[in-house]
Image (cartoon, grey):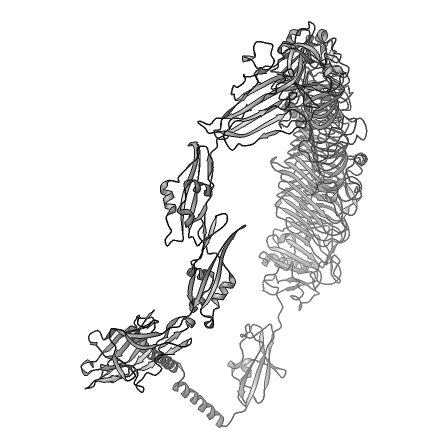
Amino acid sequence: MKRFLTTLLVFLLTSGPCFSYAMVVAQAESVTKTSEEQSMSSSDPVVSSIDSLEETKETDVQASSEPASTDSSTGATDTASAETEASSEAAEEVQVTFLTDTEHVFATGETRTQISKNKGEALKESDSPVFEDDTAFEGWSLDGTVYTSQALTELILTENQTLTAVFKPTVKARAADISLAEQSIKEIIAEADKTKVIAVPSPAGDDSAYAEYTNSAEGIRQALFDMYQNGNGQEFALYVGSGGSLSLPTNLTSKTIPATIDNTNMTFYALQGKVSRLIITGHGDDPITDATTLTSGSRTVALGTDIYFGSDVVIRNLNYTGTRMYMNGHSLSLNGGSTGNGLAIYGGSNNGDLTGNPTITVNATGSGTWNIYGGNQSGGTLTGNTAIVVNNTVGGISTIAGGANIGTIDGNTNVAINRLNGTLGSYYGGGLGTNASNTANVTGNVETTIQTTNTSFRLSAFTGGVQYGNIGGTIRSTISGAGGWSGTANRFIGGSFYGNIGSDRSKDAIVTNLDASSYSTGRSEFEGGNRNTGTITGNIVNTVKAGPSASVGGIGDFNGGGGNNVSTLTQSSMGASNTTTYDNYTPEQRAALAEAAASFKVYGDITSHLVSGSFSNGAIYSTAAGRGGYVEGNTTIEVGTITSDGSPGGDGIAYTGTRPTNLDYSTTNKTRGNASGWDIVGGGGYPGTAWDIYIKGNTKTILNNTVARWTYGGSFSGVIEGNSSNTLNSGIVDTLEGTGYTGRRVYGDGRTTVNNGQVDWFLSGGGWDDLLVTGNVAVTVYDGVINASLGASYGVASSHTINGNSDNRVFGGNFSGTPRTGSNGFSGGVTNNGRLLGNASLTLDLRDYDGEFALPSGTNISGGNPFNSTNIVGTDSSNTITLNIYTKPGSDALNGATIYGDGGRTASNTRSGKIYMNIQAEGSSIGNLYTTYYSNISSSQILRDVEMRVQGAKSINGISGGNASDNFTNTIVANSSNQVKMSFGENVDGTASYQTDPIAVTGLGIVNFTELNVTNGIKLMANGGDIKNGRSATAANHATTYHQFGDIHLSKDAGIGISSATNLISGAKLTVEDKGTIESPPGTGRINLSDFATPDTDKDHLTWLKTTTNDAGSRVNSQGTWFGAVSAYQVLTINPTAANAAAITPINFSGIEKATGKTFIGDNDVTNAANGYGIAIPGSIINYEVETPGVANGIGAISHNVTAVKENNTPLTLQAWGTEQAGTQVQKGRLLIPYTVTELPTLTFTPETQTSGSWVYAGQIKSSKLDSTDQQLTEQPDSEPVDWTSPDGEYSYDISVRYSNKAEVQARNVILTEQEAQSLTKEQAVTYLEASGRPFFKDTLTDEVLAAIQEPLETAVYRKQAITFSVGENDQNQAETTVNLVVVKNESVISADRQFAVYAKDVRLTLPEATALTDEAALADYTQATTIFADNRANIPPTVDPQAFAAIQQATEDELLKNVSTAYHYEAGSQRAEKVVNVAVAGELILSSVPTDFDFGQQKVATETQDYWPTITGELAVKDTRGSERSPWRLTVKEQQPLTDGTDQLTDVFRFVANGQEQMITSGEMIIEETELTENGTYVVNQHWGESQNEGIKLTVPVEQQKVGDYQGTLSWQLVSAPGNP
């Protein structure tokens, strides 16, 4: 039931004698509407009125801004005016048009304007348009007559007229911002008399565009004189007139400035300071052209023998003749359209000092022989910078010199040649200098740039500096572009012939960039420094790119420093006549001697990069430093440009002759480098000239991409006071050598590096025939194809000496080829001939190499001398030989190579005292591994002290501490201070990576050692050979000849062995540390030793590996010290002192049969007088141990049941041996049970339970039986002991057990119904929760908690109870888990795993509620449907059957009452819970609407009681859709709030009239309708209300209550579905 309120509003007007009951407003489910709100509603029209006002206002605004009467008046006036004109008599008009041209526009910018005048009217002067510039204006042309503007005023206009402006003809002046050098004077002199000489502009001082002079030399003189007088430093153009050839007199061209200058003695030279530039042209049209041919019609002027200019000069469109032209410090441009007969042009003068910055620009030449110099002819100093620019020529030029012919440039010189149509015969960047007395000098820098674009250019002799003279700054030459060399006998000199260059050794003195790659013909020799003599202070940097072949841009001889004719040193001149004395000098002393003797010197580095192309054509040798002299700096030659992938070829290859095509690296194609004939050195000199050069610095050769023959890091000859190196990055060479060819001395180191490429003959850190290298030599190979032999040096003669050490290292590469010629040496010593007086070292380290390394079969590797050589290595016993070999595991990199510590043939030629051999070659097969090729025994002594360390190898054919024939004996070793120590398995490469497969030693086996150490798990197996301290040792002679040396040491599970009964092991004392193995067949004399030791009896142990089976007959009745009379195998034979065998015990010795795993217990038999034995007794060895720590704090013990074990295993003899007696609980123990004991032992594993609560966690039983599976003990569910019994007494067992007390607890969340929880016990709760744990299980399930679980839910749907389970012994070993026990309504459906439940209840919905459902969640709000989780997840709505939901949501009135069976479910994996409820959709009884207004109108105050009927807006309606559940209903009303205006209150004024009876509406309920509908529908209660029907609600107001005011009250409606039950 709902109550509805209606607000009543009554207004009594105060403005007159009347009152108003304005309206009664009814709103369902609202209480009141305020008068303020109503006032707002009443004022809505006022808002409209305001809007109207605003619109009006806007209209008013608009009206006020519109052109109202004023504009109208104006318009009317205008109209009236127009009408007036139109109505008067019309005057006839004429049009006057003024025209001008585009060069004289009107002030408006236009060229046409028009005005109107009355016919018969005269023009006014003001009618004429104004010009932008009227300077040349003459008048107006009309019918052929020109009128001034004033004259026009006298004309009477009778018809349309056109007047055209007329201007005075004017001479065009040149544009103020354009030089006459760039502008033709054709237009300027268009009106002039071109037969005359003309000067532009006029130099006569009259400001004219030009001036005319007589057509003669005197006319020219007059023009020059005018320029002299009025030039003011400006430029002039001089047109020389037309006609025949004009000769200039000597007094006009001479180097003369008269004391008093006039028009009779004026000279060109006298223009100095008066004229900035003089443009001389011989053609009136004066075209600006690039043509190198004479402009047709141009005049010829004979300049005479010598002409001296005093200003900058431009010559164009002129044919000129002469002999010499002197610019005297001014610039000259020989421009297009002009030709000469071949002159010598000087930017300076004939001689004398002067100042200027002359630039000679050649755009055209002509016939004849041309010589161009930037400076003076015959001496003197030009202070300033000179420049020569050649842009175009008719033909070749004989000479270009950037500086003087003779004389000095106090400044810089610069030459740029862009196009030269012919041959440049001689070029000198800094000047010429004809001899030592007549030099050409430059105090500054010399710059040359030749970038020719024409293919006809030919370059002959090039000198970057001068022939004779000095250059104070840097010579920088850049040559590139098209063209070619002039023939094949050219010479390119980066420096000078004679003279000094540079002044600062920290800077570059000569920089040459030569690119002849686009040249089409010829070749040239190249010299980066001077040709003959001089001092160069600063670096020389050469970058050269040659043409594609010998005769197409190629380079011949290449010398980075001094050239082929350079002044060289001699042995006597550098103080080296006595070489012993010379060698004892200090480096400073030797340098001082060479410096004093040298005529050619370089103080700086010399660096040359031969970028690409064809070099060494018609020659053999290329040098970095040059052919001779003194060089104080580093020298480098870099050949070729490496490609992106490092392969040879491409655009960056440097070669000789024609470009090679087949560049694939090969192990069979080995002649390409040798066939090239090109030899390269990083130093200098010339073969066979011995002492011609001294280099105080390092020399370097870098081969990036080339094919060459013999390459050296050092020199062809002479002395290097520094280190030398040679690096191959890519390419093919015959030899690669670190030092030189026939150098006399290298006071430093030699180094060769191969990063990639191919070397075919030999590879060395030293050289061919350098007499002496005082430092160290080294070879480093990273990759490449190395067919060559490899050694410290090559050496062509025995005098070839290396004083220092060798350090040869190979990190990769393909070595599978063989040398082009000669033997395949692979050593740390000298390959061919000579002496290495220091230490020798060879390292092969392939660990990080990803390529495929290979050696040819039959390779001999030697750390010292090459195989079978007679060279010298070492000086005395302090020197060493070191061989290191580190291969990558898994690859047979060594391919059976024979390895020598020293492979020389003659023992006396090796003076080194010690040999180190370090080998890690896991996976590689080695041939023989010998210390020496010669005998290592001399005078009954060991000759070399040897340390051989082998970390790994696949197989070795034989190992000897000497050669294959040597035999060490007691006597030899006793006489020797040297030892041969062999170690196998020792870490030699720093990786701690140890081979697990045995090293198979065949052939000779392992012989001749004074000490044998085997460690780190390596097994050294002599398969077919022996392991003997002396090659001739036998079982018979061991006790007499081989028992005093050859100690054997085994450690870290390493071992030795022999595979055959015909082989044996011979040594002295066998010491075992940790664990060791020895493998052999059984029997006396197989393993012959003099003693046995295990330093730590608790852990050191030797295991015999028995190689035979089924040979029980080989056992010997023995008397064991420990186990008495037994049948046992004799394994270790100890002699000559049999008692030494007593050190062999069951504790430190045991055995196992390899094929079966049957085991043996060790003992000793010392009852034989000749030999003691280590014997092996069949039996079982059981080792057992408790693993510690256990899991957490788990502890326990092990015990056995073997009662035969004696306390402390005494007294001997024993039946069984054990670490403790039966029943004793221990942490670790051992049982030794010989075959004579038939009882199989049982071990018991007992956990500790009282304090730790432990249990057996895991155990492992490993059997020695071959192919058996380890037995595993699993974790036990409780703390009970576990027993294990040995299954077989022939095998041994290693047993480990581990205990645990790690706190472990588990429980799960669970859901119960109220009924299940009602009588729940603690045990049942633990079962439901599946709770368990250890050690020491505890919980929080108290009686109080159980009581809380058992309590009914009442109104709650569910209740969660948290329960904690905990375990543990202490704070460090604890665990707990907290779970939920959830109790749900009995109506809930619980999943099978009790992890969730679904709850919902039956529900009844009205039809509007049902149809208003938006989703399942909205329905769940009614059904309280929810999924309850056992864990701590929040509840979520379950899934509702979509068909049921649709049936509810889409219910209609005609279905009511509608019952829908609705299923809710939730799924998780395989678990599902479903709850079905009934949702009833029912109809409803509602007050569907109430009137919105009860309008009583406006009423006047009357003198009697008045009844007022309202106008009702809206219906008072009841809707009943209950269908089969319909029943009677009634509607009541009451006065909730009487009418009041806040002061007065109207009481008892509302009446309800029905069936003619009137009732007062009071605060009590009054029935106004009571009925029952027969079908679903709506009943309108007030459908008949109103005054006409006298039915409904009315207002009855007595006189006394008719008071002015606004009244408000509230009526309350109530609809009840059960009559009599309000």
Relative depth, front residue between 1489 and 1096: 1489
Q: Can residue 1613 be seen?
A: yes
Total marks in image: 0
Q: Front-most of 422 and 892?
A: 892
224, above or below 900, in the image? below
Quadrant including the C terminus: bottom left
On the picture, is 602 further left or further right than 1561?
A: right
Q: Nearer the viewer, residue 1374 or 539?
A: 1374
- Residue extending furthest toward the top: 1169
Provide residue 652's location: percent of width, then percent of height.
72, 43
Q: What percent of the width, then of the height, locates residue 1154?
A: 69, 22
| Residue 771 against residue 1587 in the figure, above or below | above
The part of the image, by quadrant, that contains residue 35 is bottom left
Q: Quadrant of residue 714?
A: top right
**Image location (x, y in percent) of residue 1434:** 44, 51
Note whether 1617 is above or below 911 in the view shown. Answer: below
Residue at 60% x, 55% y is: 274
- 390 with respect to 1213 (left or right): right
Q: Is residue 446 left or right of residue 295?
A: left
Can residue 599 be seen here? The reply is no
Occupied quadrant, residue 19? bottom left
Q: Quadrant of the N terminus?
A: bottom left
Question: Where residue 1439 sits in the image (x, y, percent)?
Answer: 49, 57
Q: Nearer the viewer, residue 1244 or 487?
A: 1244
